[in-house]
Each structure stands twice: as structure tokens, then as C-alpha cells.
Amino acid sequence: MHHPSENHKEQEYHSRIRKVLAHIQENLMGELSLEKLAEIACFSPFHFQKLFSLYVGESPKQYIMRLRLERIAHYLKIYPGLSIGDASFQCGFSSPSTFVRAFKKFYGHTPEAFRKLSFDEISKIGTLKPHKSKLLPIEPAEFWSMNLAMDEGPGAGMNIEVKTMRSLKVAFVDSHLGEEDAIPNTFKALTRWAGPRDLITADTQYIGVFLDMPFFTEFAKCRFRACITLPQGVSLPKDAGSMLIPEGRYASYQFKGTIRGVFRSLAEFKHGWLDHSGYQIAEVTGFEQYSENPALKPYESIQRQIFIPVKPA
């Protein structure tokens, strides 16, 4: 998603589609009509749908449905007390019967049966699906292709603290983990954009946000957001993506290693600490903070702090 475009027209199309993708991410529970999305992209509905499918590899309807189902799958596993009806409503489904049919078609299990599956069983759910995308060049592959089985006992060696964090305003560039060297390349793209605009200072913090988890989403389609904190009072150019990481309580631990190790550590965090802590996850999206710019050093060699939003259970 962040690679240089072949020409100005294509670059403009990329920018408009990325703007729509960010809007969908922030408004997944709300009304996301084709007409509204086309208006955001400044295209006619017909032209927008054609371009969206070309660049993303799914129609707007398919893309939104998939994200909603994956978010519900996440909710079903991390919020055991949340009813299936409430979970579907919170993710934009107005009809429970429509949701149940769509969920079973996508995951091969009813929501009730899915909730009882282990993460290891979920990771083995898979089909081969062709996927053609200009923004996301993925070869057909098995769903959830990472082996996330824990090598050690849950929570082994994890020193977890709960901290209160202030909000952080960040600029970001998005990519997908299916792209080669996705994380360093995304930070390189962000650095190339931010450096000439004097947005990188000695106080800049480098943050990565995993918008999807490979427990519920095909790894190659998992979205990654490379972020930098912004100086106070800065005015962002119109081509920038920005978001606010909310203040609140976060469970935090240090980690160094591969991306596979990150996701394995999250499984260990859930089963080895969270389930016995008196806390529950407050939001499905956490983040990691890097000790160095990942554009300049191999990802797996960077010390980082992982933050997961929590609230009393």
C-alpha cells in the first residue's frame, strides 16, 4: 500500500482509496454505504467500486463484511461474557440471522461453536482463496498460516505491568504483513514522508499498530500501521493519515524477536496472565513502541514495549 506509484494519477487513486480504508477502520460499526464511501473517495459509485476492487482485491461490500466478521471472531474469544447478539450488533450487523449465516459461511462454524475452539484449532481453519490486488499483492495461501503454538508454558518469562498512559497523536502509513519486509518498508515510507516536513525530532516515538490478529485473519491480510508521534500544534498536510491513541490503562511488557514471536507472546499474555489478572481487554487494538526507528534496524533486533488496553473484568 505504501509503495511508490507509477504515475501521478495512480498515486492520487492510491491516496483516495487509502482514505476510504482508514474511514472504514474507524467506522466499522456504522453505516458504510457505497454512496458514502464513493463520496469520500470523490468518485462516482460505479467508478469507486471498480477501483476499490482493483486496488484492494475485494469489493467494498466483501471487504467490510470480512472486517466485521473478523472483529466479531475477536470479540467472541476475548469477551466470554459478551452475548453473540451484542457482539454482532456492535460490529454493524442489524440482523442476527444475517450475521449467523455470514459467520458460518466465512469460518465454517456457528458463532457458538467458534467460541469453544482453541486458538490452535482456529489457526488450522483454512481455505484457498484467490486474491488479486494492486495494493496488496498476495499469492493464494492457507488462512492463518502462522504456527502460533506456544513453545513454553503460558506467560513464561513475561514481566507484565499495568500502566496509565496519556493519549498520543500520531501520523501513520498502512501496509499489510503479507508484503515482503512490510514493517521496515512501511517505516521507511513514513520516514521519507515525515522527514522533509520536519515532523521527526529527538522526541519522536515510533509505534506499530496491528489492526488485525492472525488468530482470526489470514496473516497476509493482517494490516499493520506504522506511526510516529507528532509535535504539539503541528498542522498535518492533507495527504497524511492521523489518529489518536487513547489515554487509559494498558498492560505492558517488553519483547524482542520476530513477528511470529510477537503474536505468540500475545497468546501467552491472554492465557498466562489476563485470564487470572482481574482485567479484560478494553479494545481489540493494542500497539508496540520501538526503542529505535524500524526503518534503520532489523525489526527482530529492536527492543520494544507492547501495550494492550485493559479494564476491570
Image: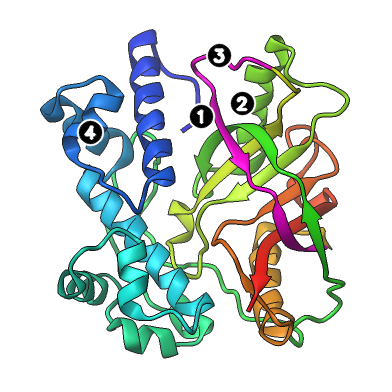
Q: Position of residue 171 (x, y in %)?
A: 62, 29
Q: Nearer the viewer, mark 4 or mark 1?
A: 4
Badge 1 local density, few (<14 within 10 Å), some, or many (20+)?
A: many
Locate residue 54 relative to residue 68 in the image: left or right: left
Q: Nearer the viewer, mark 2 or mark 4?
A: 4
Which secondary structure, mark 1? Answer: loop
Sequence-first disc among 3 and 2? 2
Q: Check disc 1 and give the amino acid type.
A: His
Query: Looking at the image, do the residues carrying marks 1 and 3 touch, with CB atoms under 8 Å apart?
Result: no
Q: Position of residue 79 (x, y in %)?
A: 51, 77
Q: Earlier in the sequence, mark 4 or mark 1?
A: 1
Whether tag 2 and tag 1 are in contact, CB under 8 A, the answer is yes
Q: Which mark is residue 70?
A: none
Judged from the image, the secondary structure of the residue bearing numbered disc 3 is loop
What is the quadrant of residue 5 in the picture? top left
**How far, Cα to Cα, is label 2 from label 4?**
29 Å
State the extent of the magenta-drawn residues as a range. 234-253
Front-most of 263 and 170?
170
Q: Is residue 161 above or below residue 56?
A: below
| Lower position in the chain sequence, tag 1 or tag 3 | 1
The earlier-in-sequence mark between 3 and 4 is 4
Q: Looking at numbered disc 3 in the image, what kind of residue is underneath it? A: Pro
Hey, what amino acid is under mark 4? Lys
